Image: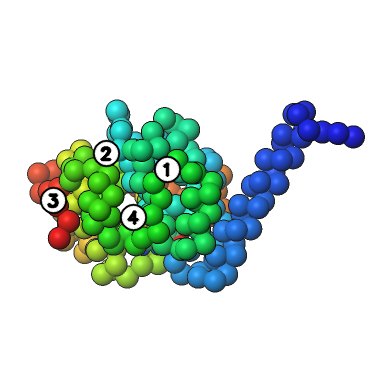
């Protein structure tokens, strides 16, 4: 029976696309389990929890660790203009997948450690013009040094009111206490969803009042 154009046909096509995306992600996890840091992409429910924390009037957003694009898709659907979104993905295969899936969006194959340099190189924004950084990075499995480098670079481009929005599968803030203290950051848990494999919490990290890293040009 021909199903094209029917509701069942659309549901089946969506399932097939989702399965292909999950398979793409899983293959990268097999190759690089530590940096991929999850066996399957985040759920749409987790994406919604993350994006509910964008500051009011958000314009410019950076996404770190785009993966197969669940947050990218949600950000664009929410009205972030493609030219106001800059996505970082370190894995070359996932970077290629993202560029094919979101042709109008600026997606770089780059390390989150180089956020400030890439923002300047791509002429994406002036320091302090970024409203939010949506992070899909597996911070929990990163060393203290790597966390420090990534968060320092992130807060050097974030606006004074800017938010670093992060999810974690762990029971507490995934950013180590020393990193939070050294960079004068503060964190609050803003959400939790069981509709993700595994269930995940969302944390919003901001500058602690009056002390955080000021936006600066890349070194
Ligand atoms: C846990 S997955 C999340 C993917 C996607 N955001 C999601 O939620 O489904 C982490 C992603 O971050 C990427 N990644 C890991 N370290 C990175 C780094 N230093 N810079 C940029 N991307 C990185 C991995 O390749 C992987 O795609």
Q: Nearer the viewer, residue 69 or 185?
A: 69
Residue marked by disc 2: 131
- Residue 63 coordinates in the image, percent (x, y): 37, 48
Q: Element at badge 3?
A: loop
Between circles 4 and 2, the one closer to the viewer is 2
Q: Which residue is mark 1?
A: 105
Q: Position of residue 71 (x, y in %)?
A: 46, 44
Q: Nearer the viewer, mark 3 or mark 2?
A: 3
Q: Position of residue 3 (x, y in %)?
A: 82, 33
Q: Earlier in the sequence, mark 2 or mark 1?
A: 1
Please report the residue visible at 47 percent of the width from the left and 57 percent of the height from the top.
95
The local secondary structure at tag 4 comes to: loop
**Residue 142's mark?**
none
The numbered mark, 3 or 4, whose residue comes first in the sequence reads 4
Q: Which residue in the protein does label 3 denote?
A: 216
Residue at mark 3 to residue at mark 4: CA–CA distance: 26 Å
Marks 1 and 3 sit apart, C-alpha to C-alpha, by 25 Å
The Cα–Cα distance between marks 2 and 1, rounded to whole angstroms, is 17 Å
Q: 117 and 113: which one is in front?
A: 117
Identify the image quadrant of the N terminus: top right
Mark 3 residue's CB less than 8 Å from ligand 1: no
């Amino acid at each position: 029976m021909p199903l094209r154009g029917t509701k069942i046909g659309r549901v089946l096509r969506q399932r097939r696309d989702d399965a292909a995306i999950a398979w793409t992600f899983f293959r990268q996890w097999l190759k690089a389990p530590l940096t991929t840091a999850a066996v399957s992409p985040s759920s749409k429910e987790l994406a919604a929890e993350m994006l509910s924390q964008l500051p009011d009037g958000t314009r410019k957003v950076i996404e770190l660790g785009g993966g197969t694009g669940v947050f990218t898709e949600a950000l664009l659907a929410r009205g972030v203009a493609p030219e106001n979104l800059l996505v970082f993905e370190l894995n070359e295969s996932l970077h290629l997948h993202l560029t094919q899936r979101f042709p109008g969006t600026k997606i770089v194959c780059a390390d989150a450690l180089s956020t400030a340099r890439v923002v300047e190189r791509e002429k994406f924004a002036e320091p302090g013009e970024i409203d939010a950084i949506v992070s899909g990075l597996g911070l929990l499995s990163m060393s203290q040094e790597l966390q420090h480098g990534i968060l320092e670079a992130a807060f050097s481009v974030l606006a004074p009111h800017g938010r670093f929005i992060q999810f974690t599968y762990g029971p507490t803030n995934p950013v180590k206490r020393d990193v939070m203290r050294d960079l004068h950051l503060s964190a609050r848990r803003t959400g939790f969803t069981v509709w993700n494999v595994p269930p995940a919490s969302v944390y919003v990290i901001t500058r602690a009042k009056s002390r955080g890293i000021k936006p600066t040009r890349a070194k």
